Image (cartoon, rainbow, N blue to C red):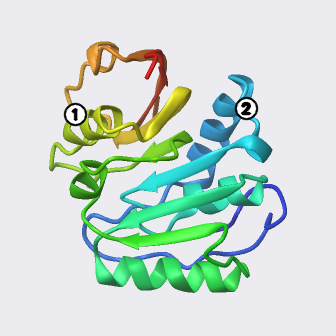
Amino acid sequence: MRIIAGTFGGRILKTVEGPGYRPAMSRVRESLFSMLESRGVLWQTSRVMDVFAGSGSLAFEALSRGALEARLVEMAPQAVRCLQGNARLLGLDASRCQIVADDAIKMLAKACHKPYQVVFIDPPYGKNLLQPTLNNLLRRGWLAEDGLVCAEIEMALAYHADTAHDSLELLADRTFGQTRILIWQNISTQ
């Protein structure tokens, strides 16, 4: 998988193979980042979190475009090793790229002291993890006021994005083949 733009543009990332892993394809990533930038995301002032990170393609793309720092949350040991290898490959240290080997929903149930401007959520298909992830993310203060949440889910999932949470306003709901991309903005005053 290739990073599209920025400092690491053109660099190839290692990916995780096996059931449940599907790195965000270049076309989807390019569209997602275009949508985010058209909605005012300035990477140079943004902290990002990649939940269910897998190979980390979304966080590494954000870092390549200038994000201040990224937290990548992944539970599977094979994927954590892949993330660590990709961070080394790109020369990223813990000051910009924090890899957290933990269950995402449990980690998000803990209080956050410094919220993120952009949060990517790419839960494994067929496990219905998006809603509990969103609930903990918002309940515990992980998303900054006016921050954006981007979710990648299976198109076939019957998910009512416009009523996902009282604190979220749906900005985009797009499909790319079998993938559905949702973008919300945090409208709560935390």
> In which quadrant will I find the C terminus?
top left
174 and 89: which is toward the camera = 89
> In which quadrant will I find the N terminus?
bottom right
**Label 2: how many Cα within 10 Å (few below 14, some 14–19, many 20+):** few
160 lies above or below 135: above
153 lies above or below 73: above
The image quarter in which residue 163 lies? top left
Q: Amino acid at mark 1?
A: Leu
x then y, percent, for residue 122: 38, 50
Tell me, yes or no, if residue 167 can be seen here.
yes
Q: Amino acid at mark 2?
A: Glu
| Mark-to-mark CA distance, 2 and 1 | 27 Å
User: Where does label 2 land, which residue?
Assistant: 37
Q: Residue at x 50, y 52 (%)?
A: 49
131 and 94: which is toward the camera = 94
Query: What secondary structure is found at the residue carrying circle 1?
Result: loop
49 lies above or below 85: above
x then y, percent, for residue 48: 57, 49
User: Where does label 1 land, which residue?
Assistant: 157
The image quarter in which residue 130 lies? top left
x then y, percent, for residue 182: 43, 29
Q: Is residue 89 left or right of residue 154?
A: right
Residue, far left: 127
Q: Residue at x 48, y 72 (%)?
A: 99
Disc 2 versus disc 1: nearer the observer: 2
Q: Residue at x 28, y 75 (%)?
A: 76
N-terminal of the pair, mark 2 or mark 1, is 2
Q: Is residue 180 left or right of residue 108?
A: right
Q: Residue at x 22, y 33 (%)?
A: 157
